[in-house]
Amino acid sequence: MVGKAKADDRAKESAKAGCAASMPMARDPAAAVAEEYEAARRKGTREAFELFIARHSDDPLAEQARAELKRLSR
């Protein structure tokens, strides 16, 4: 009976480890913002930069987006 209990415990631990191993790592938020900025830059429209600024106004890349907007308005 003790052997069965230990086997059950090992199976439960193995199942927990399998679930944890299959979950993806958390994504770096800064990388996601940088990708979004690059997408706006590739699009190159006022709307794309305005949307980026609206979503990430406090991010340092927002300054670059503002500069792009000024460049577009010339």
Image (cartoon, helix red, strand yellow):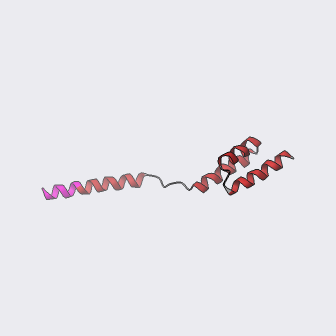
The residue positioned 76% from the left and 51% from the top of the image is 66
The residue positioned 74% from the left and 54% from the top of the image is 64
Q: Residue furthest left?
A: 1
Question: Residue 47 location in percent, x, y?
Answer: 74, 41
In the image, residue 16 sits, relative to residue 54, either above or below, namely below
Q: Residue furthest right?
A: 74
Camera-side residue: 59 or 22? 59
Question: Residue 29 location in percent, x, y?
Answer: 58, 54
Where's the N terminus, which quadrant?
A: bottom left
Relative to 71, 52 lies left or right: left
Image quarter for residue 63?
bottom right
The residue positioned 22% from the left and 54% from the top of the image is 8
Camera-side residue: 30 or 62? 62
Image quarter for residue 9?
bottom left
Relative to 41, 74 lies left or right: right
User: What is the total number of numbered labels drawn onto the structure image?
Assistant: 0
Q: Magenta region: which residues?
A: 1-8
Relative to 32, 4 lies left or right: left
Relative to 31, 48 lies left or right: right
The overriding secondary structure of the stretch rendered in magenta is helix
In the image, residue 55 sits, relative to residue 25, either above or below, namely above
Camera-side residue: 30 or 22? 30
Q: Residue furthest front?
A: 58
Question: Residue 35 location in percent, x, y?
Answer: 64, 51
Residue 55 included in the magenta stretch of the image: no
Question: Residue 37 location in percent, x, y?
Answer: 68, 50
Residue 3 included in the magenta stretch of the image: yes
Image quarter for residue 60?
bottom right
